[in-house]
């Protein structure tokens, strides 16, 4: 599904978040008109794509009308005032169900918003609806299909959010990542998917699968779209012990600046390069060649082979912790794959879990040596194009290392496979250096002649 790139020619639903924000602030677009356009688009394409698990048009329009009335009154407005955003269905919303992608939680109605939803509302955003997640944000697919080819997976676990943005149903949407749940669907659906530094955005009121890994993120149509949404959600929250009381990083301002020097990028194949298909191998060879002196290949030492197994230890033990009640009371209500992961987590010894925690910082210490020389790492976001079939959400193997290390990452739709489908390029940065990573990402897309992604 394609759209024009000139904002003046676009239907409101096809505007990116930054484009829509500018028109809302200028008064050339109302929130009600924008939401109406999004609802029209949803009606036109969602029967095929199935990105939403809950959508109440009247509730969305009520929020939009209230936003327009507030702007007309001259009252203060936030940076996202009137902007509709999709919310992954593991994130609590007080006025909509949150069912976590499972029949076991069907009809669940939270009493309060998740912290990040509350911050979006405070910034003026319209909570458009809840997007489809895989079962408990793990691997078993939901109903969503890939907008580029409905016979293929959109990726997961943030399936509906990535597909909704890619098909112009909403300008931005929230997701989460414990392994590859932001980066992989962004790659398969051809959108920008930003996974911040671990702990930057609160998970208060979000279904947990692994406390040391779970990270909230944003899908948008450009790097600046993701920066705009993410910046409003960053901050300390007593409900999430992994957040810190630090100054909010200026994502939007820094990402919008020109780098003082052209960035140097380290092309890292990572220990799982054998999983890359021919499209990825050939695409990255051409990409590295096109970047010339700005990029060179850097091998990782063998200690990084530990990342994948250690990430799985933390993931499976987390599932055993947070889904113990469901496993004990309703095991038949869980997929075979999820039951196996819970059982694996229950078998894990404490010494192995603690070692997996410690190795996060061991590997990150090794990565800091790279970041002392390079502005960012460039590496695949996925093994190739979105696979055919809807029984799987694809292989997250190219994401495990970076999620495990807690570093920020963004997938950029810069490559195309042999079937004409998008393939993401993943950029990875130093912990808590998210703003500079996004600035480097904007430089990269402009350098490669795709300014619409900036």
Image (spheres, rainbow, N blue to C red):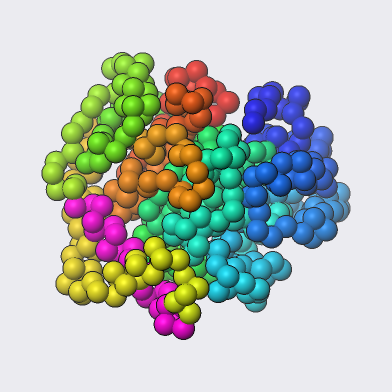
Please tell me whether residue 287 belongs to the stretch shown in magenta: no
179 sits left or right of 446 in the view = left
Give the tally of numbered discs. Answer: 0
Chain part drawn in magenta: 306-329
Q: Residue at x 37, y 53 (%)?
A: 179
428 sits left or right of 305 in the view = right
Residue at the left extreme of this rendering: 302
Q: Residue at x 18, y 48 (%)?
A: 305
Q: Nearer the viewer, residue 408 or 396?
A: 396
Residue 350 drawn above or below residue 100: below
Label the magenta part by its dominant secondary structure: helix
Please tell me whether residue 318 belongs to the stretch shown in magenta: yes
Q: Position of residue 334 (x, y in %)?
A: 47, 70
Residue 277 drawn above or below residue 333: above
Residue at the bottom extreme of this rendering: 329
Q: Position of residue 47 (x, y in %)?
A: 71, 47
Can residue 83 be seen here? The reply is: no
Residue 399 drawn above or below residue 106: above
Q: Residue at x 44, y 20 (%)?
A: 447
Q: Nearer the viewer, residue 34 or 228?
A: 34
Q: Residue at x 20, y 58 (%)?
A: 359
Q: Nearer the viewer, residue 8 or 23?
A: 8
Q: Position of residue 384 (x, y in %)?
A: 40, 34
21 sits left or right of 439 in the view = right
The image quadrant where one finds the N terminus is top right
Residue 9 drawn above or below residue 424: above
Can residue 136 be seen here? The reply is: yes
Q: Position of residue 225 (x, y in %)?
A: 58, 39
Q: Quadrant of residue 16?
A: top right
């Amino acid at each position: 599904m394609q759209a024009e790139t000139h904002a003046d020619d676009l239907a409101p639903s096809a505007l990116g978040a930054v484009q829509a924000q500018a028109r809302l602030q200028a008064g050339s677009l109302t929130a009600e008109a924008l939401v109406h356009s999004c609802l029209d688009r949803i009606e036109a394409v969602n029967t095929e794509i199935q990105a939403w698990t809950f959508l109440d048009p009247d509730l969305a329009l009520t929020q939009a009308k209230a936003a327009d009335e507030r702007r007309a009154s001259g009252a203060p407005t936030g940076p996202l005032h009137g902007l509709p955003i999709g919310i992954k269905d593991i994130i609590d919303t007080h006025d909509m169900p949150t069912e976590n992608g499972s029949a076991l939680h069907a009809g669940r109605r939270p009493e309060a918003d998740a912290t990040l939803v509350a911050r979006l509302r405070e910034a003026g955003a319209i909570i458009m609806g809840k997007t489809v997640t895989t079962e408990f944000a793990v691997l078993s697919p939901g109903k969503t299909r890939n907008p580029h080819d409905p016979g293929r997976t959109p990726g997961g676990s943030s399936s509906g959010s990535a597909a909704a943005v890619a098909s112009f149903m909403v300008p931005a949407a929230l997701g989460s990542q414990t392994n590859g749940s932001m980066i992989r669907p962004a790659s398969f659906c051809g959108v920008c998917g930003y996974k911040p530094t671990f702990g930057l955005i609160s998970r208060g009121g979000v279904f947990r699968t692994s406390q040391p890994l779970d990270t909230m993120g944003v899908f948008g149509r450009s790097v600046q779209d993701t920066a705009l949404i993410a910046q409003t959600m960053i901050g300390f929250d007593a409900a999430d012990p992994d957040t810190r009381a630090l100054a909010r990083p200026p994502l939007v301002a820094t990402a919008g600046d020109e780098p003082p020097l052209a960035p140097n990028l380290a092309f890292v194949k990572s220990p799982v390069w054998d999983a890359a298909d021919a499209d990825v191998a050939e695409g990255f060879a051409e990409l590295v060649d096109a970047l010339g002196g700005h990029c060179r290949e850097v091998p990782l030492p063998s200690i990084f082979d530990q990342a994948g197994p250690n990430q799985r230890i933390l993931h499976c033990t987390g599932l055993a912790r947070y889904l113990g009640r469901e496993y004990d009371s309703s095991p038949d209500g869980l997929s075979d794959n999820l039951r196996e992961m819970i059982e694996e987590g229950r078998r894990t010894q404490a010494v192995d879990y603690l070692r997996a925690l410690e190795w996060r910082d061991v590997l990150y210490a090794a990565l800091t040596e790279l970041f002392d020389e390079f502005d960012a790492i460039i590496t695949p976001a996925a093994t190739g194009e979105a696979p055919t079939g809807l029984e799987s959400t694809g292989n997250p193997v190219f994401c495990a290392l970076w999620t495990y290390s807690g570093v920020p990452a963004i997938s950029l739709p810069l490559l195309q496979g042999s079937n004409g489908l998008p393939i993401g390029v993943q950029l990875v940065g130093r912990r808590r250096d998210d703003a500079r990573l996004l600035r480097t990402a904007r430089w990269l897309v402009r350098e490669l002649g795709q300014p619409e992604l900036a």
